[in-house]
Amino acid sequence: MPLPMKELFDIPEGMIYLDGNSLGPLVKGVSDAVKDAVEAQWGGQLIKGWNSCGWMEQPTRVGNQVASLIGAPDGSVVMGDTLSIKVFQALAAGLALRPERRVILSDNGNFPSDLYMAEGLIDLKGQGYALKVVDPEDVIAAIDDTVAVVMLTEVDYRTGRRHDMVAITNAAQAAGAVMVWDLAHSAGAVDVDLAGSGCEFAVGCTYKYLNGGPGAPAFIYVRPDLAASVTPALSGWLGHKAPFAFDQSYTPAPDIERMRVGTPSVLQLAALERAMVVWEKTSVAEVRAASIALCDLFIAEVEARCPQLTLISPRVGAERGSQVSFAFEHGYPAMQALIDRNVIGDFRAPNVMRFGFTPLFIGREDVIAAVDVLETVLKDRLWDAPHYKTKSRVT
């Protein structure tokens, strides 16, 4: 099926949705799948649903679907909890693999929650552990024999700058460090080859390019040769070797299931599992090629027609994810004016107007139409209205 595949999505009429990098739209059929999970499964089966409806297997079943999009083999990805929880698990497991080292290395383009989780873990462990944060360009040079874990988000959430996964993973492992990748802005957007990279761990969310809905569960990948030996850190009962033996002491499952923590979010997983059917009709490679073309077009149009904005994303397509960001002194009110006119992007402090391009439902005509509106907002100073300058809780 050629891209875009707008007929697969429920997007309000007349809306140009350039925020799939923050929250993907509703895939048609998801409402029915959730309704079935609520009424026929939960309502009709009640507690029997754990067995009769396959609820207990959801995290690994859906994990295999995600694995197919990130270059990971079956049985190496499991779903559950939030991305922050999975970051904590991966970091803790990585530190346990290098007990003689004390440094977690990251960069200042990483999503703040990842850094917060690292800080919290360090506070819990004490013993001289430290978080070292450098500029993205300086990561490889900063990897030395003090570094236990290198933790990076592959695609910068503000600028879209993309790290070289293979080069950095190779550098980390050559120095004896463990590699953890956050794929929040990668899964379903760019070509990822976890198996080929050789990294030890990866984590990510599913409510962006995978369209799992607000609060959709996160995933964690563990390299298969480590899955039976890594320390889960958060030793929840569903990560136990035999949860329903109700042992008083924890024995981890012998595979990726040891990275499960609590009861799976059945309704959220039902939504995500149904949303993933769009990937039966296309591939990440097709989406990636179309994304680069759309982003290139947007950059060219904005720079030709909106000189007030300054590009802060990489100009070369291979060096960025599936978003384009421009800096503008009045970025927040300008984005609110755009949203008011049905062109949906978002704002990131201090001055970043961020636009995501998901070729599953965005085409060239949408790009041109969006820039038409943006040009009018800027040229006529439509953003300079008091009600656009009051910041909402979510920007």
Image: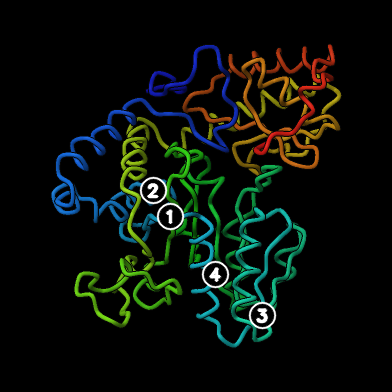
Residue 145 visible somewhere in the drawing: no
Disc 4 on helix, strand or loop? helix
- Residue 129: give its label: 3
Q: Relative to the observer, which residue lies in front, 285 or 237?
A: 237
Q: Please, what is the three-letter code of the amino acid marked with disc 3?
A: Tyr
Q: Is residue 145 left or right of residue 67?
A: right
Q: CA distance from mark 1 to mark 2?
A: 8 Å
Disc 3 on helix, strand or loop? loop
Q: Residues within 10 Å of mark 2 (few under 14, many from 20)?
A: many
Q: CA distance from mark 3 to mark 2?
A: 33 Å
Task: Give above or below for 213 relative to 342.
Answer: below
Q: Please, what is the three-letter code of the amino acid marked with disc 1?
A: Phe
Q: Relative to the observer, which residue lies in front, 59 or 135?
A: 59
Image position, residue 278 (x, y; %): 36, 32
- Residue 91: give its label: 4
Q: CA distance from mark 1 to mark 3?
A: 26 Å
Image position, residue 255 (x, y; %): 31, 70
Q: CA distance from mark 4 to mark 3?
A: 12 Å
Q: Residues within 10 Å of mark 3 (few under 14, many from 20)?
A: some
Determine which residue is flagged by label 1.
219
At a point 70% along the width and 66% down the height, the residue shown is: 140
